[in-house]
Amino acid sequence: MPDFLLEIGLEEVPARMLASAQAELLKRTVALLTREQLISADPVAHSYSTPRRLAVLVKDVLSQQPDITEETTGPAVKIAFKEGVPTPAAEAFARKSGVAVSELKTISTPKGDYLAATTLKRGRTTAEVLAAELPKEIAAIYWAKNMYWRPGKPERFVRPVLWLACLLGEEVVPVTFAGKTAGRATYGHRVLSTGDPFEIVSPQSYLAQLEGEYVLADVEVRRQKIRKALDKVTREIPNARWREDHPLVDAVTHLTEWPDVVLGNFEPAYLELPEEVLVTVMRDHQKYFAVEDASGKLAAHFLTVTNIALDEVNTPIIKQGNERVLRARFNDARFFWEFDQRTPLADRVKLLEHVTFQKELGSYAKKSERVRALAATLAAIATSRGATLDTSAIEAAATLAKTDLTTDLVKEFTELQGIIGGLYARSQGLPATVADAIYDQYLPASASDAIPRSAEGAILGLADRIDTIANMFALGMEPTGSKDPFALRRAANAIVKILAESTLPLTLSDVLAAAAPTSEVASKLVAFFHERIDFYLREARGQAYDVVKAAVAAGTDDLHDLVARAEAVTAARGSEDFLAVSAAFKRMKNILTQAHAKGDIASSIVDHDLLLDPAEKLLAVTASAAASAIEELQRERNYGEALRVIATLRQSIDDFFDKVMVMSPEDDIRANRLALLNRTLEDLSRVADFSEIVTAG
Amino acid sequence: MPSVVEKKKALTFQELLFTLQRFWAEHGCVLQQPYDLEVGAGTMSPDTFLRVLGPKPISIAYAQPSRRPADGRYGENPNRLFRHTQLQVILKPPPERVQELYLESLVAIGIDLRQHDIKFEEDNWEWPVGGAWGVGWQVMLDGQEITQFTYFQQCGGMDLDPISGEITYGLERIAQFLQDLDSIYDIVWSRDPVTGRELTYGEVRLHEEQQFSAYSFDYADVPSLWKHLELYEAECLALLARAKETLVEENTDALAVLRFPVLGAYELALKCSHTFNLLDARGAISVTERVGVMARIRNLIVGVAKIYAEQGRLTAAA
């Protein structure tokens, strides 16, 4: 069977969009061929991309759909024939089926006899199917940003389509999209190839032919070539290694068709600038890899990934050009670094009056005031619970935290806000606790990021974010759907992570109560944070959906406690006893709900004199013993043991359900049994609501 | 370290300009002179901003001195200028394989593509004040951004059809690159063909950078600038109001439609934009005010774009 190849030739596609577009083209092509019954259930398919092309190759594609024999049912025989003569209904059905009335047959169904026709649905050729269907799939590929280019605006795509190549085996499939009809011609590297098109012989020869024209279409091959070249070039410097940076490797892989690496140098004098600034210039502005020495210290070299074949002539030229650019950028950074220092952070507090935080919330000076007060409140609560905090450092850090917004260096490198403030604080002789808190104030920026290193930094991070969130909510600017222009969800995620992962003895309600201006805002915040807590447990902690529901039902205020409970439930959920108890809890809950619906409101006070059956007496004793044991274990957050205690109740619960009829006709007995169940549920649900755990069967 | 570039062979600043202009003229562009008002970029010249509107095809190229008062550094920073020079090319509609054409222009100015690393990296352009945006690339040559390449999609808040391709060369950066220099001020601007005497960029322009930096940062009179802004704005608004009466289907006076000074209104809007930039450089605009003033200028510029499109429609129909 022939292989299938599609290549879409494009003007340079943004690097950030290539990986997902390539995957989507593969998915859509395979789905189409599967839908049209042109490939096996387990097809072999590959996709490729460079900045100038997207391609997909599918092995063993039928060149023709199979013919399908279909039986269609028509009108009832008694309608189709009147006194043996076909009626218009019979004739219409025959016409529709493409057969003569005499060729129709009769089938018996439970509803009576019906006419039926056997028709042969001819399969289309693969070329026909693709010509009709493939353009729709190409057009449907998602791009983060699209453009029009042809007059009349017939279609949008990421960049203008320059050519299409489409082959089934060695035959061209003339698919048409964006005014281009596919042939077998493609193009090599912009500069290294001739610039003239050449013909792809067959899908199997595609990769090798492109490689002959200086294009490595396989992304993984390119990535490996880049990594090897980075290694090789770095070996020129003794004891040095390039600094691993997966997102950067990704970016340069998607920016090149024929990658290689040039090593450049800069004057060691620039190493006096903070490493953060140097690395940002290299990585974010120039896409250069940093080089470090054996101890991990930045070395005065950089690596740039090129899209050209290197030789003795062009290597020094390219090296020199890149070195000049970097020198200019480092010079600028040095100029800003020195210039900013002429106005110390303390003198910049006043300047914050002119920097707007948000129209209705005023300047950053005002915000800093609020954050300072909030941080003091939170610090006082934490101290009252035994935390040791440098409160004067917190005050100083909160006062100075935003002053770096007035520096030229932050205006130039906005991604370094906070970090630059911390660096200036350190360089201006402020205590390390203050400088570190300022430096870490935007941590964590994502779920995988670390939290601030110090408790003082954590307090500042909490205060800054809850101020923003609470005030935005008070203004009615909470996130809705996909709209979150002030990134409040991210800010709340950070608060949850800090509360869960720092050692601060603070709860969610401490933080919310300190900032919420009204009770209405407070209740909105609680709902908002519940979503973020769910998200944190699932995304950052990898907890299953049902475990999260179960653990959250037993309280969300103390996040340390919540995490410990969720993790214990996850660890225990594999055990058979635990699952049996979960199922039993579900049953108990159902009984209580049904009783409630009938007007039996369960109390939680059990009258031991009314317990008649040995099984219910046993449950009352074991459950009450378990409850006190759990209370003790909860204090130590030893939830693993607490769950083991709960699991030991399996036997007495099972016996209870086997032998005792809860819904006794005698009112007082029934009420007492409901109370026993209710009490047991209440006592044991302090760890988690086990009825939420999904059990098989 | 000795340079690996043969400096004598590199084009002077003025040769660079000649060569690019000749290149694009040979590829069908009308060569226009620089626009004689202060603009921050070649895009703001009516030859770009207004001509990309409407259906009429055009290919046009011009050098555009571009003033950015806040970017001035008193001539002390070797890489930053108050006024730099762009070579602006507008191709409406863009021809197929316009990137190849662009690369040919680099060859024309002496860049051997096999000896350099060239990349087209995503860079989308947006000018909110003009209601304009497009998608495209920054062209990187050995790590230096030398050109902004944009497919205009919207202008004055209106969808464009056909779209335009815009190529903006940063001439100082390219000259610096060709001549392998660390400072813009060392660029050889011209070389006397008889005596071989060279004049540098610094000799030609440094005093401008010094004085205009001083003017923008230290001397420009803030109350007067606010007054200028208000006067220009008021006159522009008055013209926009009159356009609403004049540029209408029912107006049978074809000459009045044709002569209505949309271009004059545009100049007033540009004056406002430059005045705003001066106030900004003077530090006279707080962040709070900033949004408001920008909205005022947007109102003017988008307003002019709308009446320009309307005038074009009416005169084409006539």
Image (tube, coloured by chain):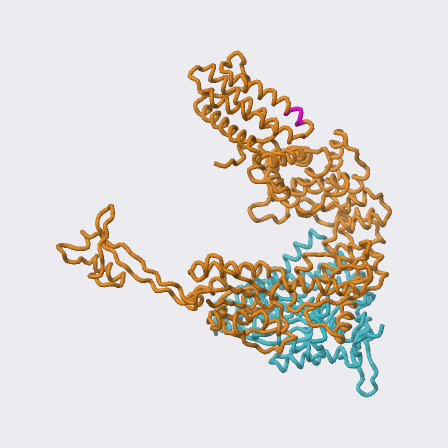
Chain colours: A orange, B cyan
Number of numbered discs visible in the structure rendering: 0
Q: Quadrant of the N terminus of chain B?
A: bottom right
Q: Main secondary structure of the magenta part?
A: helix
Q: Quadrant of residue A194?
A: bottom right
Q: Give the answer, above or below, for where A532 lies relative to B13.
A: above
Is residue B248 found left or right of B170 in the rendered image? left
Q: Nearer the viewer, residue A481 or A287?
A: A287
Look at the image and say whether residue A130 sits in the magenta stretch. no
Part of the protein shown in magenta = A630-634
Q: Quadrant of residue B117?
A: bottom right
Extreme residue toward the left, this view: A83
Residue A342 rendering spot, x and y as whole percentages: 85, 54
Q: Give the answer, above or below, for where A525 lies relative to A284.
A: above
Is residue A270 found left or right of B139 in the rendered image? right
Residue A350 rendering spot, x and y as whole percentages: 79, 47
| Residue A341 visible somewhere in the drawing | yes
